[in-house]
Amino acid sequence: MSRTMATEYNGTADPARSLALLWRTHERSSRKGKPDLSVDRIAAAAIDIADAEGLAALSMRRVAERLGVGTMSLYTYVPAKAELVDVMLDTVYGETARPEDVPGGWRARLALIARENRDLHRRHPWMLQVAAVNRPVLGPNLMAKYEYELRAVAGIGLTEIEMDFVVNLVASYVQGAARGAVDAAQSESRSGVTDEQWWRAHAPLLGRLFDPERYPTAAAVGSAVGESHGSAYDPDANFEFGLERVLDGIEAFLAARPRP
């Protein structure tokens, strides 16, 4: 099923209500005779809907239908969709692996973090519809994730500000790369045709329209890429190449620092 990639801006939720939900400071118990509802169950149902159809398809009514309860019963636990999205985000932030021992130093640690975040976006493409950079969801899972990512670059010669810059640099790269991967996967899902099948079907027409003598560099590069990837774009190969270049830049920055 297709997903709509329109952006839903985070920050519209009431901060006090969101924080109370995120940290479960006053979660209510299910009333006697009612289905066993909780913020966690509501968030899990909402995540399932968003994973399949995107945030545009998410509503309190849809969540209630999935849980088999009346819509109004959800408001006992979650004030509105905006706060629910905050809880959904913090819930999925808890999925990333955070091993303590990662052989290979800071590069290996950052590479692991990048791949974990790339995979998180692939599992939950709707995350790309939420702009949460300036007003992040300050829940327990996000804070634990941020703490772990900062520790990956602690003690390598960066100032505290630079540690935050580096973590954000990697996160921004991952988000951009994930968007390309998600778009490619959704194109295949919507059309039912793989990239390789699409290019094979259109090759005769492209061959008649494209003049390799006029665009020799594009012809040579396009041919090499097509032979290597079976299409014009390989999300995984592009991700790994870009990640290594990001890490190279960080390494060059560290190497240029004056020695104490």
Image (cartoon, helix red, strand yellow):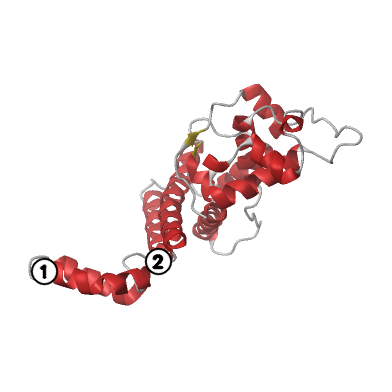
Rendered residue at 53%/45% (across/down): 127
**Disc 1: which residue:** 211
- For label 2, the crowd category at 10 Å Cα-Cα, with few meaning under 14, some 14 to 19 and many 20 or more, is few
Name the one closer to the observer, 89 or 102: 89
Indicate whether 120 appears above or below 206: above
- Which of discs 2 and 1 lies nearer the camera? The answer is 1
Indicate whether 242 appears above or below 229: above
Q: Residue 237, how many percent across, how many down?
A: 40, 66
Q: Residue 199, how many percent across, how many down?
A: 30, 70
Rendered residue at 85%/34% (across/down): 30
Q: Residue 17, how many percent across, how many down?
A: 67, 24
Rendered residue at 58%/64% (across/down): 103
Q: Residue 224, how many percent across, how many down?
A: 26, 74
**Disc 2: which residue:** 237
Total count of labels: 2
Name the one closer to the observer, 72 or 229: 72
